[in-house]
Image: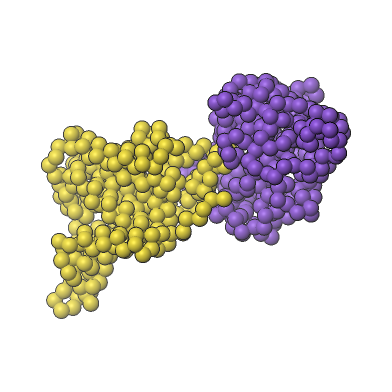
Amino acid sequence: MEYFVQQLINGLTLGAVYGLIAIGYTMVYGIIGMINFAHGEIFMIGAFHALIIALGLGITTGTWIPVALVAALVGTMLLTPIYGWALERVAYRPLRGSPRLATLITAIGMSIYLPNQVQLLQGARIKTLPPVLQGGFEIMEGGGFVVTLSYLQILIMVLTVTLMVAFTLIIEKTALGRAQRACEQDRTMAALSGINVDRTIALTFVMGATLASVAGMIFLLRYGVIDFFIGFLVGIKAFTAAVLGGIGSLPGAMLGGFLIGLIEAFWSGYFTVEYKDVAAFSILVLVLIFRPTGLLGKPDIEKV
Amino acid sequence: MTDACTHPQTPLLHVEHLTMRFGGLVAADDVSFKAQDRKITAIIGPNGAGKTTLFNCLTGFYAPTSGRLELNHPTRGECLLERMEGHRIARDAGVARTFQNIRLFARMTVLENLIVAQHNRLMRASGFSFLGLLGFKRYVDAETQAVELARYWLDRIGLTERADWEAGNLPYGDQRRLEVARAMCTEPVLLCLDEPAAGLNPRESADLNRLLTFIRDEHSIGLLLIEHDMSVVMGISDHIVVLDYGRKIADGTPRAVRNDPAVIRAYLGDENDEENDNAMPPKVTADPKGGDV
């Protein structure tokens, strides 16, 4: 039982990372109907920004740690979206209206280009951040097993839930969110209602990148080790999460993220750590076979 | 520039020598006409006459091969529509449009459809939305105003009760009127309606006529109307432009156009002088590219 609770906590924090990235996939898919395969790389760049800022400040111990954390968080949330914006502007906008295959190839191209750029600039070696936030609560004990909820995990959950609530509010309540939903349903008509469609799409990429950058920072704090290649696997798993939840659906992406995190945590807890990726991707296969629209996705209704 | 609407000789819309070619096909051939504000100008003609092409040029879907589309905005002055992007035509020139086939945001509520149309004012007031989240007063005020305007139009089209319905679930006639209301929420000076009465029953059609004359009289904007239903055209339009094979063949009051021999020939062929009510061939898409955009 204690072991189960511990894996549940681990799974939820892991799922938070996937959920935050999956939102980026699902929003972009919703608005322009393409899979932004370079989104995982944006996550990786977010992790690097956070690392550079944290190390640049030179604070890894002492009472100033919260300041360093906030600086890293704000910094990466401001810098990483520039990549998201540039990605859309350079790689996707010129191809708008071209066949789907063309944008897919560009997306894959960008997902090869970005890690290579980071590799050139930062080197291929792994980068480490000393654990900055240690300790936590012991919430349960039994059979010699102590269930801990670390401060870091609390921080991750609070951050994730806050961001998810904030973004849901933006989509549901603000003019920008309405514009995004309008573009999603009928881009031409949105333009005729005076909505700047190009700008709305660019802002969607910016928002997705903001969330991915936070996920990057969480990843950095949680594992303390990053390199230029982390974007691939995490990105693919977040994509799986988006498909599992129903691509195009915002709550679906969050749900899918948490589910994939839990599946991974429980699989590594009860079966083998080596095969946790197999477990996650088997889910992708099963979902695609039995429920292609995902858990919360709506079936594609033919436009009249 | 405010005197644009005080000089009756300055038309709201002045189309000059509009030509639109698609390869060898000439969809609009040297079309010139004027439309005034506070007037309903109907564009009629058999299928393939170039009516929807004309609308597509006016609203920025097509860049005309040649010609000049001048819109005299009462406050913002002269706008050349052929040089503007689609969303700027709606935003800066004040031209709104509805489509032959209904294009509401079907998965938004009725009220949201009307608020989305006021997007630009809200975005400006909200500092691009992020500030708005923090509850800045200016944004809240703008939002309240937007809802008020939306409520006003809901009341006009009789959908106040159904404000929270998903737009896609409304009956057909209500969707038509909602589309007109949404276009009006962009606060246009020229409203282009592409077959608004298509598929309506006589009662819905009469409701629509009342709505359109209300807009003309109370909101003093200009309306351009493509319509096949002659009871609508003859009933409410102040001015009629007749197109055939991309060319303008007549231009004048309903009475003058009705008796114009060229018009009768275009609709009914030679040696036939009956009234042209409901004498249209079966409907196919009116523009050469198929569909209306």
Q: In the rendered picture, chain A carries what hue?
A: yellow
What residue is rendered at 26% in x and 62% in y?
A282
Q: In the rendered picture, chain B carries what hue?
A: purple
Q: Is residue B236 visible?
A: no
Q: Residue furthest bottom?
A: A143
Residue B176 in the figure: left or right of residue A251: right
Image location (x, y in percent) of residue B255:
87, 33
**Quadrant of the image occupied by residue B63:** top right
Compared to residue B63, the image places residue B287 above or below, namely below
What residue is rendered at 78% in x and 34% in y?
B269
Image location (x, y in percent) of residue B283:
68, 44
Compared to residue B223, the image places residue B67 above or below, namely above
Residue B89 in the figure: left or right of residue A139: right
What residue is rendered at 62% in x and 26% in y?
B26
Give the colouring mode of the picture: by chain
Image location (x, y in percent) of residue A165:
42, 56
Relative depth, front residue between B142 and B256: B256
Relative depth, front residue between B212 and B287: B287
Image location (x, y in percent) of residue B152:
71, 49
Residue A92 in the figure: left or right of residue A5: right
Residue B126 in the figure: left or right of residue A266: right
Relative depth, front residue between A299 and A198: A299
Q: Is residue A229 visible?
A: yes
